[in-house]
Amino acid sequence: MADVKWIKITTDIFDDEKILLIESMPSADSIIVIWFKLLTLAGKQNNDGVFMMSNRIAYTDEMLASIFRREISTVRFALRTFEQFGMIELIDNVITIPNWGKHQTLDAYEKKKQRDRERIARKRAEQRQKIGTPAPLSLNASPDVSPDMSPDVAFTDRDIEEDKDKEEEKNIYAPVISFLNEKAGTKYKPTSGKTQTLIRARMNEGFTLEDFQTVISKKCAEWMGTDMEKYLRPETLFGTKFEGYLNSNNGKELKKNGSTQSNYRTMGEKVGTYL
């Protein structure tokens, strides 16, 4: 498959519990660099997070050490750590990144651009109709350039963002907050800017409405009737611990302090899969 020119990294990646644990390990900086090199290599390959040089040749630790220009011992230690933390998986001796397709929706950018182009075209068609201006005759005219438009009806990027926000509020924010209010007996509004930012951030990471409902249901079942009930709010539920809540079995939080390298595997299993 053709390579891509970018990968998606969340801005709170260094608040993630797996990264925090790695930073307490020997050669932490080297391990983190190797992780980012793995992510960029997966992006270049665009093979759903499966590290195959060809249909028959899988990348080995020696090959990665050569490509990454790192000592083989460091690469092996990093790979063992990533496997323990669920950041990579070995399937038939092939290195893979779990949930790559979920977290790295590499076609989303192109889809967004296409939606924006279509939205611009529709908006400008409406504007031309209002001012009585015919549509351009050229078949090659770009929807982003319209010299026949009056300056006082020009369609701006801000208009696009406002339309998109209204659409997202209708399709994303309201169902999530309505479910929270129903389960927790709260009265939060989907129009809150901070709430919308949190929901949008999690949605951009690939989480679905069903994931939000799962987290809300788990935390309501665990916290209702306890001192923790006051934390049944968007700031807590949809923040950086969202994926941990989603993957938890009993709601118990991972302790960050007092950990030793000997129990990294157990920690990795508790933390969950992939950044």
Image (spheres, rainbow, N blue to C red):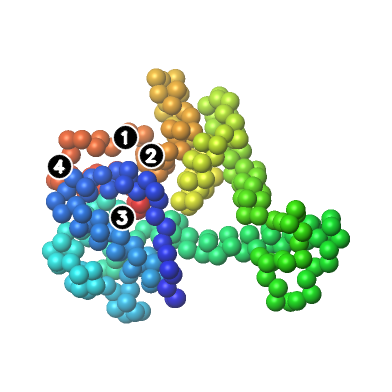
Q: Are marks 1 and 2 in contact (CB under 8 Å)?
A: yes
Alpha carbons under labels 1 and 2: distance apart: 9 Å
- Identified by mark 3, the residue type is Met
Instruction: Where is residue 20? Give x, y as percent.
Output: 26, 44
- Identified by mark 4, the residue type is Thr
Alpha carbons under labels 2 and 4: distance apart: 22 Å
Where is mark 2, residue-wise? 241
Where is mark 1, residue-wise? 253
Where is mark 4, residue-wise? 260
Is 217 situated left or right of 122 in this image?
A: left
Where is mark 3, residue-wise? 87
Secondary-structure class at tag 4? loop
Alpha carbons under labels 1 and 4: distance apart: 17 Å
Q: Earlier in the sequence, mark 2 or mark 3?
A: 3
- Identified by mark 2, the residue type is Lys
Q: Earlier in the sequence, mark 1 or mark 3?
A: 3
